[in-house]
Each structure stands twice: as structure tokens, then as C-alpha cells.
Image (tube, helix red, strand yellow):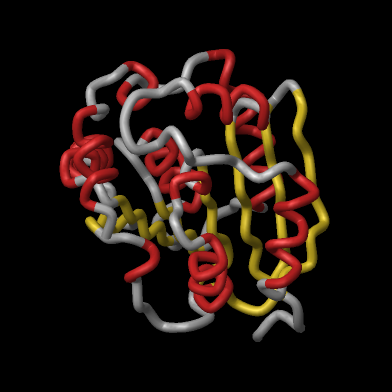
Amino acid sequence: MNRVKAAYFDAMTTMPWAAEPFGSEEQPKIARLLAAAEIRPGVSVLEPGCGTGRLTAILADAVGPAGRVLALDISPKMVQACRDRIGQRQNVQVLQAALEEYVGEPEVFDVAICHQVFPHFEDKAAVLATLVRSLKRGGRLLVVHFANTTVINEIHRTAAGPIQQDRLPAPAEMRGLLSVAGLAVDWCTDDSLGYLVRGVHLGPVKS
């Protein structure tokens, strides 16, 4: 686990961008994310980098009691904030863990969503291998930001602390990374609603 980054995000827990619920401006972006992820009742979701749970709560409500969300984050304070936000929902598990160190059963999730976290992974190829291993055949991996590449990379470049070198790959580069990991990329967008790249795990869906 990157303890320096964990401490950095601990300090960000109460910042408005991390703590406040999504506003009206984000609703079309959330709608596109949910549509691209094909979120529906009964779906199982892996959410690395869950932060304070702003998206986690939305996902949990969307998949319903028959669904499941496993949310991970390296920041202890963000994990606690996520648990507080989730409240009594029974279909969510929140763990303090680095995705690079996560070992779970293979092929158990319908969807993996990297929302506003992918630039912060140190070994992106290893992370993608872990995510693909976790997906069922036909499962979907989304890399999503609610701003485009130029905006995200400028925010990180000008930030103080350990995220200055963290970059969001351009869509063409991300397409290549996902393809190497064994995913068929069928959605690649970088526009006014933000950044969304989707890959589908190759092979038939398991019955």
C-alpha cells in the first residue's frame, strides 16, 4: 500500500469535492456511468478507490438487495466516511485495502468501476490484471472521471503532495492498456461530461 498517498487522501476526507453529495451538474454524468456499466438490480460491483462513498451509495441503491457492492480504498479516514454514508445498507462491504493487494475469488463481479482513481495506481498493468481476474466473462470494466483528461491532469499537475505525477492516460492509450489486459474496448469518450472508457471481458458469459 502507498502509505504516503493514503495519508494524503486522509487529509482530503472533508474537502467538498470528496465529501459533498453529487449536485445537479453531476447527474447526467452519473446517468451515463450507470448506463455504460449496465447497472441494474442484482448486479455485483467492485469499486476500487471508493473515497467517502458518494458513488458507492448510488451503486448500492441501484443494484438493490439482490446485488452487491465491494468498495475499497487505501485511506482509513475515507473508508470510515464511506461506511458512515452507507449506513444500514446490507448489500455493501467497505474495506481498507489497496487494489494491488486485493486477493479475491476470480470471476465474481459483473462490473468493476474505477471512478476518479485510475491515475493514482502506481502499477496500472498489475491493477488491470487484478480487475480482469475479478470479472465474470462478459463483465465490464469502466474507467470514469467527471472531467476530461486535460482538466484532470492539470489538477494533479498543480496539486501539492504525492499526486503531482499521477496522470490519466489519453483515451487511445487507455484503449491499448485495456486491450493488453484482455478487454474488448467498446466505449471510449473524453468530452464535456468527462472521461469514460469501457472494456468487456472477452469470452462468453458464464451461466
Front in this rendered view, residue 14 or 2: 2
Quadrant of res 184: bottom right
Image quarter in which the C terminus is found: bottom right
State the image coordinates of residue 173 (x, y, percent, origin top left). 74, 52
Looking at the image, how many numbered discs can be counted on the residues? 0
Image quarter in which the N terminus is found: bottom left
Residue drawn at (33%, 40%) of the image? 51
Q: Is 83 left, or right, of 136 in this rendering? A: left
State the image coordinates of residue 132 (x, y, percent, origin top left). 58, 73
Q: Is residue 111 above or below residue 10?
A: below
Front in this rendered view, residue 40 or 15: 15
Q: Is residue 94 above or below residue 179?
A: above
Q: Is 76 left, or right, of 121 in this rendering? A: left
State the image coordinates of residue 120 (x, y, percent, origin top left). 44, 46
Front in this rendered view, residue 11 or 141: 11
Residue drawn at (57%, 28%) of the image? 152
State the image coordinates of residue 68 (x, y, percent, origin top left). 41, 61
Quadrant of res 54: top left
Q: Is residue 91 above or below residue 172?
A: below
Q: Is 158 left, or right, of 20 in this rendering? A: right
Residue drawn at (43%, 43%) of the image? 61
Quadrant of res 35: top right
Residue drawn at (24%, 39%) of the image? 78
